[in-house]
Amino acid sequence: MGHAVDKDLLTLVQQNLKDLINDYNNINAVLALQSKQLANVEDKVTVLDDRLDALVQQQKERQEAEMTRREEIDRILKRLLSFEKFVNESLLMKFQALEGGLSKTDSKVENLEQGLAEVENKVEQLGQEVKGRRTMDVKAG
């Protein structure tokens, strides 16, 4: 009987060992599959990381281009404002010069009008004197 128990025990141990070996092989197969899947995931992560790096670089380049464009716009705006100030000052000086010229012209026109009025008065006086002399010459004659 001891021999039969030993034989049954050996068979049981052998069966357990076969089951353990099968489990081990199954676990190794699952681990191999998971390793492949992990490698695929790592590859995808690497691709995504590369894409992210490229997108970050593109964003950085766009921001730099935007800053350059804004700086250029600021320089142009400053030049335009400076030009506008120059034009305004020039126009103001010309306007003031024209006002001064018009004021002088108005003064000269007034002087001419006064002179013309005086000349008209003298012409009228001379006309009356000439008329008066003719009347005297006609009476005397």
Image: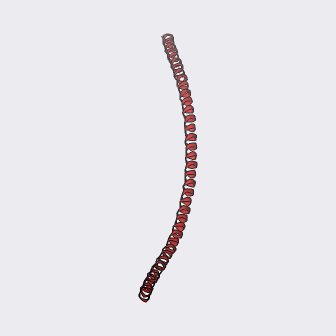
In the visual, does 34 lie left or right of 131?
Answer: right
Q: Position of residue 19 (x, y in %)?
A: 50, 17
Residue occupying image coordinates x 56% and y 60%: 82
Residue occupying image coordinates x 58% and y 54%: 75
Query: In which image quadrant can residue 117 be found?
Result: bottom left
Residue occupying image coordinates x 55% and y 47%: 66
Q: Position of residue 87 (x, y in %)?
A: 54, 61
Position of the C terminus by quadrant: bottom left
Q: Is residue 92 above or below residue 15?
A: below
Q: Nearer the viewer, residue 24 or 113?
A: 113
In the picture as drawn, the residue positioned furthest to the bottom comes out as: 140
Query: In which image quadrant can residue 38 be found?
Result: top right
Q: Is residue 16 above or below residue 116?
A: above
In the picture as drawn, the residue positioned furthest to the front comes out as: 141
Q: Is residue 54 above or below residue 95?
A: above
Q: Position of residue 77 (x, y in %)?
A: 54, 55
Q: Nearer the viewer, residue 138 or 27?
A: 138
Q: Nearer the viewer, residue 76 or 21?
A: 76
Q: Nearer the viewer, residue 15 or 77?
A: 77
